[in-house]
Amino acid sequence: MSQLPNLQTLRRLPAGDLVSLAEDIRAFLVERVCAVGGHLGPNLGAVELTLALHRVFDSPRDTLVFDIGHQAYVHKLLTGRAGRFGSLRAAEGLSGYPSRSESPHDLVENSHSSTALAYADGLAKARRLTSDSDRAVVAVIGDGALTGGMAWEGLNNLGAAPERPVIVVVNDNGRSYAPTTGALAAHLSELRRAGATPPRRNFFTELGFDYLGPVDGHDVGAVEEALRRARALGRPAVVHAVTVKGKGYGLAEADEADRLHAVGAVDPATGRPAAPTSPAGSPVTSGRSWTSAFGAELATLAADRDDVVAVTASMLRPTGLHPMREKFPERVFDVGIAEQHAVTSAAGLAMGGFHPVVAIYATFLNRAFDQVLMDVALHRLPVTFVLDRAGITGPDGPSHHGMWDLSVLSAVPGLRIAAPRDAHQLGEQLREAVACQDGPTVLRLPKATAGPAIPEQARMDGIDILHRTRSGPLDVLIVPAGPLATAALDAVALLEDHGLGVTVADPRWILPVPASLPALAARHRLVVTAEDGLRTGGMGTALAQACRDTAVTTPVLTLGLPTAFVPQGPRGALLARSGLDGPGIAAAVHAAMAGAKDAVTAATHQATHASASPATNAVMSSGGRDGDI
């Protein structure tokens, strides 16, 4: 791509130059995003729209808020970040979403859907209170994001406030991850069909907005004219821009399954994943993802039980529900980007005699915590939540790591949480979850390949013993959550080489703490828990409390993620950085054992004695004396 114009030059470009500029931008996006991965389809569809926005409005003096921020790649290009696209979504690289640390043009780091109108409402109030009313506030929102409850709340507030002249640009491509569903989608479709002569009254005008459109979102001049008119109105206005997702890249335009919405590294000629290679250059065989394993298991389970239904929030394929949808379309419900509605609707299904399986990304279930607590758990309803992308997810960064679910959901009475360690366990525990009829259940699945099966040596009171040192003392009990069983087993050799006796126990159902686990802990000198959630408030914290409640004095060392926003990066590297790989677990054990010995020595000499010194992302808890290991 030739040198991009800066924003001042862009505003002076003749209209005839904009077509070739848009083509150059599309070619750049296909080349760079296919090489490193990212959100391809949404950004190809927003090229002309973004050019028009930056020609009409003076960012950052005028504020542009993108909802969802994954459609902001062109905005990043036009605001001076083209040279960083080789590091898109890489560790310490360019974020896949707007980022305040990257540019003053990114005021809002918007990566969860349907929030832009609320931000815009607040900004407009602030501008009015500070007499900055000449600074425009523009919210760019997709038709998919308009299915979210917060978007409706924003429309309700903005439409009733003519003194807050927010411009709402509806980027309408008829899709989110999949075709947009619901009554509003049907209404937008009617407006699109009406073309140049839309009805004088529509949903937006009834709420108090002026409506401009529909306009061709790929005609820069038409979009510019509508935006200038909207600004001149001086009151809330909707500009309805009709776009084509994947515009200009035939494979993406024809991608009805939306596989090119967000991609890893792909071959731009085929749109198919590029074959990964080993350091020696030979192809690497990829394993099956946890998502696809779940999808196959659920479809099989649904064939066995006609009371099983599935619910998702506009993420049918990304959460693995497509196989069930193909077999039982009438039993799979996509409610749009509306997690709160999804959960309470599932509660209603359960009240009606069905067992709903609600498949949602772990990070997005945070938005429906009250519904899980008060609408499902309070009524002790049999609803199973399958949380995809639980724990560290990787390149989408802090907003998409599913690291809060254990700490948040551990507060829900009667909720049981399982963490399968392999695909076989996933199938087994999914059936156990659906068999529960006296309350809600949760299964956590990572964004990763489901590795080989990890067989148990024995099952004791529902706990799987994955390893036990054959002879000698029982020094350390390692309790991993789900897929971290692999890291726990990797730590065994490093510990046994130092003469320590090690047991690795997978509780399978990690919360509430299995009643037999404190008794097993009592037979060891130290317990170490490892979970890819916050190190406080999750499985380790609960086990430490259970030990105290049962007068077990064995200290519990809790390993997990820090209470911080973890940056983007490869999943394995981020887990290792938090001490959640084999060497990290072993190092934490050695540090804890050494710290305990020092504490005992200090106590013997009647010195002031400090607490044990755990690893960075660890918390030590004990029901007994300090240093009693």
Image (cartoon, rainbow, N blue to C red):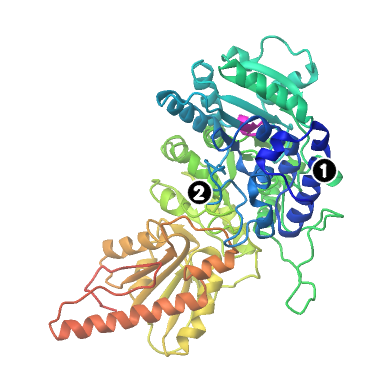
At x 75%, y 13%, the residue is 198
Q: In the rendered view, does 240 fall on the left or right side of 497? A: right
Q: In the rendered view, does 78 fall on the left or right side of 1? A: left
Q: Which residue is mark 1?
A: 23
Q: Which residue is mark 2?
A: 441
Residue 409 magenta-highlighted: no
Magenta stretch bounds: 140-147
State the SS at label 2: strand
> Residue 383 placed where, x, y %?
53, 42
Q: Is residue 400 above or below residue 378?
A: below
- Dividing the picture into quarters, in which one does residue 562 lie? bottom left
- Dividing the picture into quarters, in which one does residue 242 lie? top right
> Residue 355 placed where, x, y %?
58, 41
Report the number of numbered marks.
2
At x 61%, y 26%, the residue is 168
Q: Badge 2: how crowded within 10 Å, few (<14), some, or many (20+)?
A: many
> Residue 184 placed where, x, y %?
66, 23
Q: Is residue 502 above or below residue 2?
A: below
At x 65%, y 64%, the residue is 450
At x 55%, y 55%, the residue is 390
Q: Is label 1 or label 2 in front?
A: 1
Comparing 150 with 483, the one in front is: 150
Q: Is residue 532 above or below residue 173?
A: below
In space, the residues marked 1 and 2 are separated at their CA atoms by 49 Å
Comparing 299 with 362, the one in front is: 362
Residue 142 magenta-highlighted: yes
